[in-house]
């Protein structure tokens, strides 16, 4: 039973995209969970860090555990995960109109779009089966289904989905539309806002939107006290991420072992030691509760790992289910804190 404790660091990055330096960039990257890579002007993908400026033509790629957030010049943002590649197809910021057009090839995407006030303003997302256009809304796209299909779910506002034949289907808040490639499209389903908000992917993004909304490139990068206006940043974040990065490197080495149970025990010990170090830090007051919840969730995880390893085979599955839930809980808090290196995953 391999229970990996992955907390790998996001390395590399640094090169500016078509948007120029961070003060002039039309978009900016936030890494919420590794691995996230960026390709600028077709130069090939490289690991990227939060704060990297992005421009038209750049591509952002996430692996199976990667979670990336792109913040645009107009205050809108988009998050992608699950092996997705997000392409910044068109970014225009001129007096006559503001345009954000992106594309995803697969995986899941969350969009929070500022209200568009100019007739020439536009925000659109291309998918393998349709194009979603909005004028200020919050909605999710899930293109992880098989065969090729995408589900569009709206929690605020109205989304217009243009199909391959040119037809447009409006989706209102509380509705979901599923589009399959080369199959007839049925009317949007009235799922209900409460049910949509309970979907894990949507709930996680709504929490991030409410507790830790990002700021546009070049705005509010540093607060008066020297800390970023979003997340657990500054010296504290650097210390926390360094601890998690070190744990990730140790666990990567341990994972080369052949005995899965021994690997899990050693990795649990590494995580326990990392949690002890994290608990010795002094987080900013505004994020202290969130930080404590992250540590508590990960401590539950290590306890459950050891219990599962010592339990009879017929009792293991229930414990594994609980530890996966504890891991997801801790990872959610780490993402909310924007401590990318402290997002733990279960293999």
Image (tube, rainbow, N blue to C red):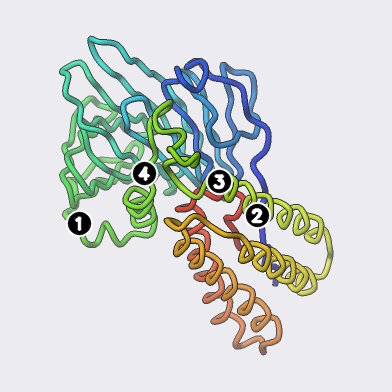
Q: Read off the residue under disc 3.
A: 66
Q: Locate residue 265 relative to residue 26 in the image: left or right.
A: right
Q: Residue at x 53, y 57 (%)?
A: 283
Q: Position of residue 299 (x, y in %)?
A: 59, 73
Instruction: Give the vertical position of 122 relative to 238 (above or below).
Output: above
Q: Position of residue 149 (x, y in %)?
A: 37, 43
Residues at marks 3 and 1 touching, judged by CB atoms closer than 8 Å: no
Q: Read off the residue under disc 2.
A: 7
Q: Secondary structure at mark 3?
A: loop
Residues at marks 3 and 2 touching, judged by CB atoms closer than 8 Å: no
- Is any part of residue 96 visible from this angle? yes
User: What label sits on residue 213 in the rendered view?
Assistant: 4
Q: Position of residue 162 (x, y in %)?
A: 24, 30
- Precedes in sequence: disc 4 or disc 1: 1
Q: Which of the two discs, 3 and 2, sits closer to the camera?
A: 2
**Real-space Cα separation, disc 3 to disc 2, in angstroms:** 11 Å
Q: Secondary structure at mark 1?
A: helix
Q: Position of residue 191 (x, y in %)?
A: 20, 57
Number of numbered labels in the structure image: 4
């Amino acid at each position: 039973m391999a229970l990996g404790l992955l907390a790998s660091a996001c390395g590399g990055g640094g090169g500016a995209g078509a948007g120029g330096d961070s003060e002039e960039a039309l978009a900016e990257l936030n890494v919420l969970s590794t691995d996230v890579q960026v390709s600028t002007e077709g130069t090939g993908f490289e690991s990227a860090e939060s704060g990297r400026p992005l421009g038209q033509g750049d591509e952002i790629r996430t692996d199976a555990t990667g979670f990336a957030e792109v913040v645009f010049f107009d205050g809108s943002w988009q998050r992608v995960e699950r092996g997705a590649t997000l392409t910044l197809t068109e970014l225009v910021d001129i007096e006559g109109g503001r345009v954000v057009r992106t594309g995803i090839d697969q995986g899941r995407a969350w969009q929070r779009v500022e209200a568009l006030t100019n007739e020439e303003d536009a925000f659109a997302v291309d998918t393998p089966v349709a194009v979603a256009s909005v004028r200020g809304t919050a909605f999710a796209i899930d293109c992880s289904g098989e065969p090729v299909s995408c589900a569009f779910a709206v929690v605020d506002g109205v989304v217009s989905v243009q199909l391959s034949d040119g037809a447009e289907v409006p989706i209102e808040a509380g509705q979901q539309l599923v589009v399959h490639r080369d199959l007839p499209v049925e009317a949007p389903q009235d799922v209900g806002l409460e049910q949509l908000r309970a979907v894990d992917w949507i709930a996680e993004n709504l929490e991030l939107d409410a507790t830790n909304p990002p700021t546009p490139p070049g705005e509010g990068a540093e607060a008066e006290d020297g800390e970023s206006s979003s997340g657990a940043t500054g010296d504290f974040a650097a210390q926390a991420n360094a601890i998690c990065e070190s744990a990730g490197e140790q666990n990567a080495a341990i994972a080369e072992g052949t005995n899965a149970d021994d690997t899990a025990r050693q990795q649990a010990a590494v995580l326990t030691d990392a949690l002890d170090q994290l608990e010795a830090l002094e987080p900013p007051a505004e994020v202290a509760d969130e930080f404590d919840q992250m540590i508590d969730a990960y401590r539950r995880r290590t306890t459950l790992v050891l219990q599962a390893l010592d339990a009879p085979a017929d009792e293991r599955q229930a414990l594994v289910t609980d530890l996966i839930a504890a891991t997801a809980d801790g990872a959610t808090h780490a993402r909310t804190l924007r401590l990318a290196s402290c997002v733990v995953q279960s293999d």
